Amino acid sequence: MYIIYGGKKMKRLQILISIILIVGLLFLSSLVSFAQVNEEQYKKALVGSLEERWGLIVDQAKKEGKVDFTMWGGNAVINEWVDTYVAGRMKQLYGITVERTPMAAPDFINKLLAEKQAEVKIGTIDLLWINGENFYTAMKNELLWGPFTYNLPNFLKYCNPNAPDIAYDFGYPTLGYEAPYTRAQLNFTYDSARIKNPPKNLDELTKWIKDHPGRFTYPAPPDFTGSTFVKTIFYHTNKTGGYQAFLGDEFKEKLLKDSWGPTWEWFNEIKPYLWRKGETYPASKSLLNTMFAQGEVDFTMANGPSNTAVMITRGKFPPTARPMVLEEGTIGNANFTAIASNAPHKAAAMVLSNFLISPECQINQADPKIRGDLLGIEYSKLSAEDKAKYNRIEFGPACLSEDFLSSRRLPEIGSKYLFAIEEAWTKYVLKK
């Protein structure tokens, strides 16, 4: 039996043996408290069963007693969920205190880079919410600890390491350094009380923007949602006719630059019809949500598939708000967690990462009344009981079904393309 790992085909047994050995060696060098266990326990850490190895990890995590979770803090719903449900369950199950640190991904990458340059051996960041270009930067600069995912029971039981959006993060192999957290897909929100016939495709969206000057805008890259919107438009307007030519490990810079002309023409074509005539853009998705809620614009957008339903539940959006996805499709991706290379509580970070992909946690966060993200684990791998729990979630008319979203989901291309597209948007659109 074969699986894809790091872009090569290897036998499953060879992979598991290799990872057990690697993780064991990492434990010997990185988990200081493991120095106190006896020789027999060391052998178990290297070649023992998953249950034995996980037992050692949990024991060490309990001794550490706390874990930092550094994550983007721009979503009050997610912040509350981590502070209450996640922190509460980690305390109940393991006696571990979860300390959430709000920090934008570029900021924690810069912090880790500075600590590495200063040779800070024990930092303050444990678990990171990370993906995309930030993961690429972290891996290239050796800022992450691992591989660790094949020591997580829930990763082995409920995740599919061969799934393209799990094996690769923005085209870069995850190599066991990232555990899936949730999945997401770009979608739009409109108010059905104001817009009876929303645009179904890019041509109709273009016409709608021109027919309703000042009522549409998007977050400025490098905001994650704004960048995803710009990339989605690039997929549908570049000269190659899609995204397929840009898949794979190779960065085709010349092809990119030769093909993106129509993309910048589209953005400059709609620019005079945008909010404030495109002279400025909201800095974040959260600000765009607020503008939509206050009636300043008629559309907002998010990567969270249940953003509309969650905001209705919170009383932020009108009950007539509805989600939509363009017929041509929008970009979908996965969110991940990773462990900082100088994390002070590595075992506790693994326990938290494992809990986040437990069926209990995943089903809880999938409920639009709570958080409303797509499953990071595989529905097909759930037990009959857990499937029944998931199926009882009331998604309602303000949610798009997983089947519908997957039928219009487009893959990510590599991080180098993202960097180039963000820079080009600034040069050819923002500053033009």
Image: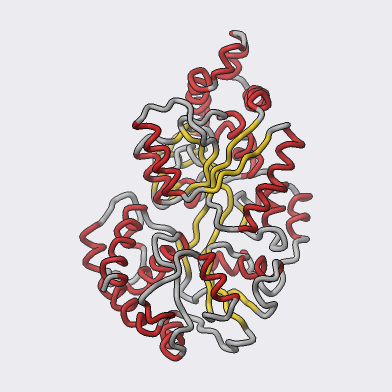
Residue 75, image quadrant: bottom right
Q: Nearer the viewer, residue 393 or 3?
A: 393
Quarter occupied by the C terminus: bottom left
Q: Position of residue 322 (x, y in %)?
A: 62, 77
Residue sitting at x 29%, y 78%: 265
Q: Is residue 320 above or below residue 83?
A: below
Q: Position of residue 78 (x, y in %)?
A: 63, 55
Q: Position of residue 301 (x, y in %)?
A: 52, 70
Is residue 339 shown left or right of residue 120?
Answer: right
Q: Is residue 371 visible?
A: yes
Is residue 374 shown left or right of residue 243?
Answer: right
Q: Position of residue 240 (x, y in %)?
A: 29, 69
Residue found farthest to the top: 39
Residue sitting at x 54%, y 65%: 286
Q: Nearer the viewer, residue 106 or 94?
A: 106
Residue sitting at x 75%, y 35%: 93
Q: Nearer the viewer, residue 357 or 268?
A: 268
Q: Is residue 245 visible?
A: no
